[in-house]
Each structure stands twice: as C-alpha cells, then as structure tokens.
Amino acid sequence: MAVNIIGITFLCGTLVQGFIALNNPTSYTPERWHGTLLTFAIALFATFINTYAASQLPSLEGLILILHIFGFFATMIPLWVMAERVDAKTVFTEFSNISEWPSTGLAVLVGQIAPIFSFLGPDGATHIAEEIKDASKIVPWCMVATALINGTLGFVILITYLFTMGDLDTVLHPPSGFSFISAFNNALGSAKGATALASLILVLEICSAISILATCSRQAFAFARDNALPFSSFFANVNPKSKIPVNAVMFTTTVTLLLSLINIGSTEAFNAIASLTVGSLYLSYILSIGAFIARRLRPEPLPRARFSLGKFGLPINIFAFFYLCFAIVFTFFPGQRHVTLQNMNWSVLVWGVVVVFAIVQYMVHGRKVYEGPVAYVQKAQ
C-alpha cells in the first residue's frame, strides 16, 4: 500500500528538483536527500487533506477533474502551436532500440512497463466503495470512464509528444531529469514558461497523491477490520467525529515516510521498493480476475449485479487474465540489456520476498484470525 504512495510522492519531489535544476543549471546540484525531504512534504500534505480536510475531499475531487481536463489543453496547445515538428514518417515508422535488446520487438515489450504504470490503479475506486452512494453502479462506471477518458487523452499526448519532442539524444538526457520538461522548454524557448506548464502536471500529481493515500489507507483499514494486520483493533478504529480511519491514514503515511528514507542511502534500493508497485498490483489483478473466471465457468448462477458486461464479460476477463500473466514477466526486466548493479531491476527480488513473507504469515497466523469481507458482510446483515 505504502509503495503506491512512495512512487507518486517521490515523483512529485523530483519534479520540483527538476524545476530548480532547469532554472538554475549552474548553481544547483540535486542531492538525494533533497528529493527525500520533498517527498516528506508531499506525503504530509496529502495526509493533512485526508484527515483534517477530509470532509472537503469529494468537492476537491470534482475540482481535480476540472483541472485535469484544463491541464490537458493548457499543456498541449503550446506544443501544437509553438513547437517544431518532425515528419509523420519519423514518428510512425522509425524505431530506436536504445536499450540494445536483441530485437526491436523485445525492446517494445520491455518498454511497455511505462504505459502499464500509467494505467495502474483502476481498482482505486473500489477501496472507498463503502463511502460512495449507490456504489454497485457508480464504482464500475467510474472505472470504465477513467480508462476511456485517460486512454484517449493519453494517446493524444503521446502523439503530440512524439511530433514535438525534438532531438532524441537531448530528450533522453535532459538537464531537468524529465524529458517532457525539455519538450516544453524547447517549444517555448523559456525555462520559466516550461516550469509554469510543467507545474500543472505537478499539481495533478500532488492531487493523485491525495487520492492514492485515501484509497491505500482504506485498504489498511479493511485489512485491519478483517484481522489481517497486527494491532488490528487500533488500525480499524474510525474517528467518531470525522468518520475517517485516521489511525490507518497515519499508519500508511508513517510507512511511506520510513521507506522514503532509504533513498538517502541507496537510490537503487529505493527504486527496487518503489518499482514493486507494478508487479504487486498485476499479481492482485491476476488472482482476482482468475478467481472470477473460475467462478463464471461453473454452472452455478452468479449473484445479481447492477453493472454487467453481458456476453462480452467472460471474453474480456480471459483476455485480461492472459495479458496480465504475459505482461507481469516484463515488469521485472531491467531497462537495459547490459545490466549493472545500478540499472538492475531489483523489484523481482523484493516482490519474491514479499510474496513468500505473505504466504508464511498467512499460514502461521493469518488463517487463524482472518475472516475476510464475505464474513464481515454476513455479520452486518
């Protein structure tokens, strides 16, 4: 849970560092501890919103959606109007295997990790379903709408970026650390203008951190309520005034802050933990969809649902299951063929340790006390 928050808060922190480096190329040297402190600041701000300002979170989410759409046009229009363009042949027919994999096809498969990361978390709405009116209908539609809207906007952004990013070598080694900031800088010819545009993305990323903390803390709360965490009664406590699981929020934030400290000592170790997000979420999707497929293939009728894909449901589930099983393999590949201690993707090691620990913990202790959501619902009824 905390791993999901680390990724987004650290991204926000390093974005700020990128802004400083862009505007002060000769006087600022980014340090690891700078990024860690900025990560702390973003995480604590998200915690404040999720506790003391939690009552305003629904209204804030509406504003975030408006900013999301506005930010798309605000960042794309300058590129459409002002940036130099490459020809369509270069965009659609030229491939660069800069990671030196044996084939371009393999390079593409390894490179899909980035777009996979962009589409992670569609399950986020399910973790706050208990706080949503008419959740059985609203939550599935929100998940579908999220994929359709962001998939469409993301494709437009991708094509725009490919046409306007400029020299590939320059983009791959940007002074700010972020190639999209360099694209803005090249288009506008102004570091301050590029910073202003990129700041919109920073604001949206901070908003994402707020939402991710809300969903992850609800996961911690739900696990504690089902006796799946140590000190479950403490973490399952709900503040009687705000109706927020404050202890679960604080627990999630604390783990995030502690893990963020690893970056000061070793960037490689920190990246190994942060990159655990993709593999761990994909495993959870595989288990969930796989169980659902097995249930649908049985002759017994399914419980009545207010949202259904009808006859397309099972084929979509099967396709998703096999794609996830295929893609999860490449989430553990290193980014480059020639591997060193620095560029190795250590997430496979961390993922394996976490999975083994979870299995052992369940066999030794969890199966004796864990009840699960079905038992909770039956008790509530």
Image: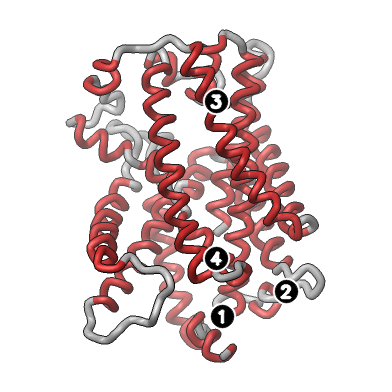
> Tag 1 or tag 3, which sits nearer the N-term?
3
Q: Secondary structure at mark 3?
A: helix
Q: Residue at x 45, y 19 (%)?
A: 173
* Residue 360 image offset from top left, x and y in percent: 43, 75
On residue 238, which mark appears? 2
Residue 287 visible from this viewpoint: yes
Q: Secondary structure at mark 2?
A: loop
Q: Earlier in the sequence, mark 1 or mark 2?
A: 1
Question: Between marks 4 and 3, how big is the CA–CA gap?
Answer: 31 Å
The residue sitting at 37% across, 22% down in the picture is: 162
The amino acid at mark 3 is Thr
The residue that appears at 47% across and 54% down in the rendered structure is 121
**Which quarter of the picture shows residue 245?**
bottom right
Which residue matches tag 1?
A: 226
Please name the amino acid that badge 1 sits on. Answer: Asp
Q: Residues within 10 Å of mark 3 (few under 14, many from 20)?
A: some
In this rendering, would 1 be left or right of 55?
left
- Which residue corresponds to the image point at 62% horizontal and 13% vertical from the top-left? 191
